[in-house]
Amino acid sequence: MLVAGIIINNIHNTKETLSGMAHRSRDVQKAHDKGVLAEARDLEKKGWDVKADISGHGYGSPPTVNGHQPDVYATKRGGTRIVEIETDPDDDPDQHTAFRRSAGQTGANFYGWVVDKGGNRRTRFE
């Protein structure tokens, strides 16, 4: 049974890592999604090819980066931006570390925004 427990634990950890989603209330999720959409639209207006983790807006899914899916992944003329939107500045430090590591290895740019309750981007972090 120890083997089965290890397998179940590994499946749980993989699922948790790949989903990358924090557990949020409905209102907090709405604020998060509003921030994701605002960042995706801003980058798109600036000529970036945007993939965003938000359904119903035609952006397509971002690729997995170091085992995590970013909220926004944008490319333009050989440049890459990996962007996270958070509702709590202390959310997902392991995910941010993975994105920073990937950015350092590939030359991509990683940054994120902390949004307020209305989904407005307030504080930028790198």
Image: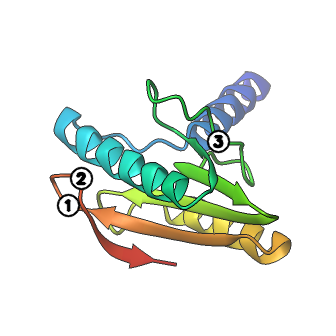
Q: Dot 1 surroundings within 10 Å: few (below 14), some, or many (20 or more)? A: some
| Residue corresponding to mark 1 | 116
Q: Residue at x 79, y 63 (%)?
A: 77
Vertical order, 124 against 71 (above or below): below
SS type, badge 1 = loop
The residue carrying mark 3 is 62
| Residue type (three-letter) at the residue carrying disc 3 | Pro
Few, some or many residues within 10 Å of mark 2 (<14, 14–19, 20+): many
Q: Nearer the viewer, residue 18 or 60?
A: 60
Q: Amino acid at mark 1?
A: Asp
Q: Are marks 3 and 2 in contact (CB under 8 Å)?
A: no
Marks 3 and 2, how far apart at CA: 20 Å
100 left or right, relative to 34: right
**SS of the residue under disc 3:** loop
- Relative placement, left or right, of 59 versus 55 is right
Q: Position of residue 11 (x, y in %)?
A: 68, 29
* Position of 125 relative to 49 (above/below): below
Question: Residue 119, which numbered label?
Answer: 2
Q: Nearer the viewer, residue 2 or 93?
A: 93
Residue 78 in the figure: left or right of residue 13: right
Image position, residue 27 (x, y; %): 17, 39
Q: Of callouts 3 and 2, which one flags the residue occurring earlier in the amino acid sequence?
A: 3
Please name the amino acid that badge 2 sits on.
Answer: Gly
Q: Nearer the viewer, residue 24 or 72?
A: 72
Q: Residues at badges 2 and 1 in contact (C-beta under 8 Å)?
A: yes
Q: Quadrant of the N terminus?
A: top right
Against 15, residue 86 (above or below) is: below
Q: Give the residue drawn at x 33%, y 66%.
A: 114
